[in-house]
Amino acid sequence: MTSLPLQAETPATSSQFAYVGTYNPNGEGVYLFKVDGQSGALTRAGIASSQANPAQLTAGQDGKTLYVASEIANYKDGKHGSVAAYAVNRTDGALSKLNEQDSQGATPAFVTLSAQGKHLFAANYGGGSVAVFPLGADGSLQPASSVQQSSGAPGAPKPEAAVVGSFAASDHNGPHAHMIASDPSGRFVFSTDLGLDRIYQWRFDQASGRLSPNTPAFIQASSAGAGPRHFVFHPNGKYVYVINEESSTLTLYHFDQTKGTLEEQESVSTLPKNYQGTNFASGLILSPDGRFAYVANRLRNSIAQFAIGAEGRLTWIDDTWTRGDYPRSIVIGPQGRFMYALNQRSDNITQFAIDKESGRLEFIDRYTGLGSPSQMVFLP
């Protein structure tokens, strides 16, 4: 598939489609929105899919397909979740279901495409497994080509790097795969396991769609009980940033592009210097130019902002109140001018202007009410 640039052929005055996944029962499915190219305002266009608990989603690289994970554990009366493929009507954004597959584990918490766009990766939080699904010519999901199950001793019950007064200790009771994604080359894949405090390192055979352990097969989290959650690659491909949910820290790793392995460099708190109490770090995103990193904090209900300097090092800038409760994720719009916070417990999406020079955020007094929003993707 050919990757289409997000900003090309998208005039600032035109509108674009976005999809938002939600949690039942407040959210009723996958919602379709129109995005104003000038103001970034969201206008609800309807429910595009009523798939159960469709909290996780990702768009095909050519914008013709949307993939949605049902974060459930009873697909077809079994104990797993599911992933579904939808064809996208480029004219009105309507979705037509192509097919659905067993996610190969309970409650899939993350889905994304391989670098070449020919496979879908899924991380099953409840089951502690990761799976790879080849894509058909029409974008449909083929049966899993590789399934890897985590196992081992649970991580520390309390995060040692958390701030004073934190009781952010959850799910260190066994494997809980939280995210899986490939490096930009597509030759290597990483997956996080919050329950085991591990980051797994895989080799990926793009022909067969199979994962095999790299050497070493995994590295430990940056601190005991940290709970590694999500990660992103820097645009230069040399740095990887990981947010740790339980410790509320952001860790920089240098990526060996030949070996496909990570080397830890530094960890910084995602919370202001004087903050004390419980917080769970959730969303993570970099600015398109790679100059800034942003982290969503749940309970603190803020978005932390960092400048990225030499060798990928992080410098605290500020944090901004989300104007909502329990931000599940954050996303930057296709023009790179606006950020959106998906506030799960307050049932709304809030919008911020991004200062491209300083990286700071400014709330622009725009709320979009929506039941339990989880994730938003813009159609390429």
Image (tube, rainbow, N blue to C red):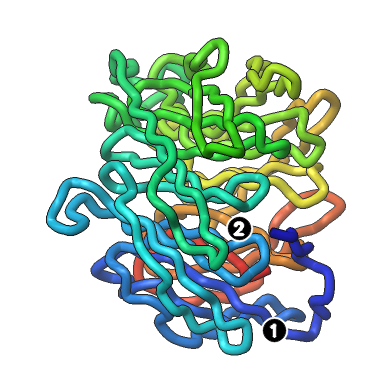
Residue type (three-letter) at the residue carrying disc 2: Val
Q: Front-most of 142 and 312?
A: 142
Residue 190 lies, with reference to residue 296, above or below; the image says above
Mark number displayed over residue 331 = 2
Would residue 87 be seen by someone viewing this image from the given angle?
yes
Going 36% across and 21% down the picture, which residue do you hit? 196
Callout 2 secondary element: strand
Q: Position of residue 183 (x, y in %)?
A: 66, 35
Task: Tell me which corner region of the image, top left, top right, bottom left or bottom right, holds residue 98.
Answer: bottom left
Q: Which residue is mark 1?
A: 15
Q: Position of residue 304 (x, y in %)?
A: 61, 44
Residue type (three-letter) at the residue carrying disc 1: Ser
Residue 139 lies, with reference to residue 227, above or below; the image says below
Would residue 343 be seen by someone viewing this image from the given angle?
no
In the image, 101: left or right of 270?
A: left
Q: Front-most of 270 and 265?
A: 265
Which image quarter is the C terminus in? bottom right
Q: Nearer the viewer, mark 2 or mark 1?
A: 1
Q: Earlier in the sequence, mark 2 or mark 1?
A: 1
Callout 2 touching callout 1 (CB < 8 Å) = no
Task: Tell me which corner region of the image, top left, top right, bottom left or bottom right, holds residue 63.
Answer: bottom right
- Characterize the local packing of mark 1: few (<14), some (14-19) or many (20 or more) Cα atoms within 10 angstroms: some
Callout 1 secondary element: strand
In the image, 198: left or right of 73?
A: right
Which image quarter is the N terminus in? bottom right
Residue 208 lies, with reference to residue 2, above or below; the image says above
In the image, 30: left or right of 50?
A: right
- Characterize the local packing of mark 2: few (<14), some (14-19) or many (20 or more) Cα atoms within 10 angstroms: many
Going 47% across and 50% down the picture, which residue do you hit? 111
